[in-house]
Structure formats: C-alpha cells, structure tokens
Image (cartoon, grey):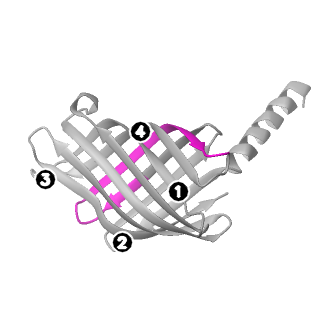
Amino acid sequence: MNLNVKAVFLAFGLLGSSIAGASTAGVNLTNETVQGDFNLDMGSFGINGGVSHDKDEDTSTGYVGLSVQDSEGGSGPLQVGIGIRLYAMDAELENDENEISLALSLGGWYRYTLQQANRLSVYGSVYYSPEILSFTNLDHMYTYDFRLEYMTMRNARAYIKYGNTVIVYDDNSRKETNKGFSIGANVDF
C-alpha cells in the first residue's frame, strides 16, 4: 500500500472518529407512531436527518437538513441551532392514492439545561415551509415539537415530547401526523 492511500485512510479514519464522537441518535414512539432522527455535530454546524411513520394517518415522512449551531461558552446551558431541511412526505390522500410531496423548510431548535437541576432540560424546535418552498401538490407545511428531557447518564437523555406535523395540500385538505405526546430517548456517541 503506497503512502498516499495510507494518508487517505488515515484522514477518513480521523474524520469519521471526530464525527462519531459528536453524533446523536434518537427515537420516540407511541402506539401509532415511530420517529427516529440523527445529528452529526461538526462543530459550528450539524448535518441531520430523520424518518417517521404514522399508522393512523398512513403517512411516512423523511428529512435531511443542515443547521448552524452554537452553545453558550462551548458547553453552557443554552444550545441553539437554525437551519434548513428538505422534507419528503408519502401520504395516502382522500382519493386513496399515495402521493409524495416535497418541501424545503426553514427553522431551528433550542435547548436550555436548568442550572439548579443540571440533568433537566427543555427542548423545542419549529420548521416551516411556505407555499413558495413547497413542491408538487403542497400548499405549505410545518412541524414543531417540545420536550422535557432528563439526562439519565452522561451520554443519554430520556424525554416526554409533544409534537405535530401539519401538511396542507393545494386543494386545502390537510394531514396532521405524529400529533400528541410520545416518549423517547437520545444517545450521544
């Protein structure tokens, strides 16, 4: 193996270990829904994605995104990120046809860890796609969630979440998926 190939493998190994060292993966669920997501923390920005399925609404959603993020003092109690996400929604509509819709959403997230109870934190996120950034048969869509998190160990958080994803189509019909309370966990690795 020549020196250039070894250098490439070493560079990918170092990059991969730095990404894996700051990655987060999570899952939350109810009896009717399941959601999973990840965030690759690259320092001042993050690459994220997620999938969800709502059995009652027969809707599946996926996204990939990029966010600029910061925390107060590097590891302070306040963490915040703003960014963009590309959503793809596969929903069964009223005419019994499944249709895939796309939307480019803008938004962000916020986490505050209470100083007096440093294992307890509050998290919220909101993403919105107006008509101009909604494609195929979409008029607009938005998604939000709020969580009360408890750090069960140094690299894991359990939480109770309330969230909703609202998809509004050109014909003014709408789907609300992943609506309500769920339980979940995040793991940092």
Q: Is residue 94 above or below residue 42?
A: below
Q: Which residue is mark 4?
A: 85
**Front residue (pair 163, 136):** 163
Q: Amino acid at mark 4?
A: Arg
Image depth: mark 3 or mark 2 in front: 2
Q: CA distance from mark 2 to mark 1?
A: 25 Å
Image depth: mark 3 or mark 4 in front: 4
The quarter of the picture where residue 170 lies is: top left
Residue ID at (56%, 51%): 78
Q: Is residue 173 left or right of residue 52?
A: left
Measured as percent of width and height from the top left, residue 167 is found at 22, 47
Q: Amino acid at mark 2?
A: Thr
Q: The magenta stretch spans which residues?
A: 51-73
Q: Amino acid at mark 1?
A: Tyr
Q: Which residue is mark 1?
A: 112
Q: CA distance from mark 1 to mark 4?
A: 22 Å
Q: CA distance from mark 3 to mark 4?
A: 28 Å
**Few, some or many C-alpha atoms within 10 Å of disc 2 (few <14, some 14-19, many ≥20)?**
some
Q: CA distance from mark 3 to mark 2?
A: 25 Å
Measured as percent of width and height from the top left, residue 73 is found at 67, 45
Q: Earlier in the sequence, mark 2 or mark 1?
A: 2
Q: Which residue is mark 3?
A: 96
Q: CA distance from mark 2 to mark 4?
A: 24 Å
Residue ID at (59%, 68%): 116
* Quarter of the image with the N terminus in it: top right
The answer to if 68 sits in the magenta stretch is yes
Image depth: mark 1 or mark 3 in front: 1
* Tag 3 near tag 2, CB within 8 Å: no
